Image (cartoon, grey):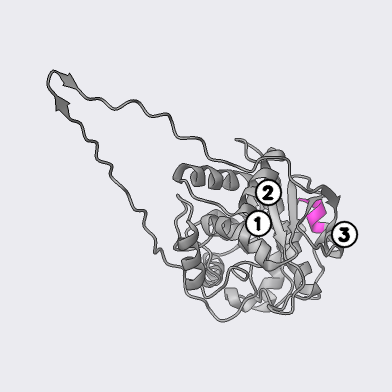
Amino acid sequence: MAPQGPSRPRKRGLFFALSIVGVLAAGTAGWFAHRPAPQPPAPPPQHTERPPPFDITSADEAAILAAHPATLRVFRYQDAPHVLVLSFPTLHEQGRMLDRLGAFVEKAGLPHDRVLDDVDLQAAIRLSGDTEDTYYYGHDYRAADIARFFALADRDGIVLHPEENELRGLLTHEGMLVPGAVGAIISIPPESASPPIDSTARATILHHELSHGAYFTDPAYAAYARDFWQTVLTEAQRAGFRHFLGTEGYDTTNEDLMLNEAQAYLVHTPDPRFFRPDLAGLSDAEAARLRQIFLAGMPAAWLKGATPVRSE
């Protein structure tokens, strides 16, 4: 999630895997064929999978926002315990841990069947017009996508940052990387002067990301958001959201991503620095009507109760 601004170019696929073909040589001498001794198997990838070096505290939105940690803090959202909230002391530390994962899961024009190495990741960030610190302001990922990210990184021998291996250790400890695990991580940055993230912006980011946490871990909420996208929004309204999300760098061919982001921006992002209805081709009155429809039947009572009331 990043503040809206001038349209940014779609991320383009730039990267292609290189394959190396090995050549085996064999020779014979006299009556004897020379056969190389069998080689031992390659050692397995080395992971940081020890218990994480920090405690996990159960907290609500207010308590999470009140904390301004000097090091990474991990909270278990008290009303949705399958959702972990990572509160970072700097945007740089957030980017080091989560940018590669974000590129893999969400970004347009980038591969979703392999993990970028450092060179390709930095090229993608530069092409987007961002830096490692500003590629995202808030992150959100379901457990299954994170598990696939680590599995493909291992498959291809991608060297991950220490911060990424720290994330692996945390989620291994939490049981989130096993098949069928229900869980999600979201993140919030600290307040910052440059780029400008004040307390209101930080609260908006957290609430926006919590709606993604609900979508990833509450089947009833996910089904409700999907039905709203498919049956309440018109095709023109869906196209408007796809256009807006495309300018923000999201992969518009991923329908699950589109409907998840649409519910989060429309209903759970009140700060106009992050979303205005006109960006998705909606009038203010049209957006207000759609929000009222969504909230009227919305499950996930904890999220509904925490959603800011707007004077429409």
Q: Position of residue 28 (x, y in %)?
A: 15, 26
Disc 3 to disc 2, C-alpha distance: 19 Å
Few, some or many residues within 10 Å of mark 2 (<14, 14–19, 20+): many
Question: CA–CA distance between discs 1 and 3?
Answer: 19 Å
Which residue was labeled with disc 2? 184
| Mark 1: few/some/many CA within 10 Å (<14, 14-19, 20+) | many
Q: CA distance from mark 2 to mark 1?
A: 7 Å
Going 37% across and 54% down the picture, which residue do you hit? 17
**Front-most of residues 251 and 115:** 115
Marks 2 and 1 in Cβ contact (< 8 Å): yes
Relative placement, left or right, of 264 versus 258 is right
- Residue range in magenta is 300-304
Question: Can residue 272 be seen in the rendering of this structure?
Answer: yes
Q: Residue at x 74, y 49 (%)?
A: 83
Identify residue for label 1: 140
Give the labeled residue for mark 3.
Answer: 63
| Residue furthest out toward the front | 30
Residue in the image at 71% along x and 65% along y = 267
- Left or right for 229, reference 253: right
What residue type is disc 3 on?
Ala
Q: Earlier in the sequence, mark 3 or mark 2?
A: 3
Residue 184 drawn in magenta: no
Query: For the stretch drawn in magenta, what is the main secondary structure?
Result: helix
Q: Secondary structure at mark 3?
A: helix
Position of residue 137 relative to residue 118, above or below, is: below
Which element carries disc 1, helix, strand or loop? strand
* Quarter of the image where the N terminus is located: bottom right
Residue 111 placement (x, y as % from top left):
44, 56
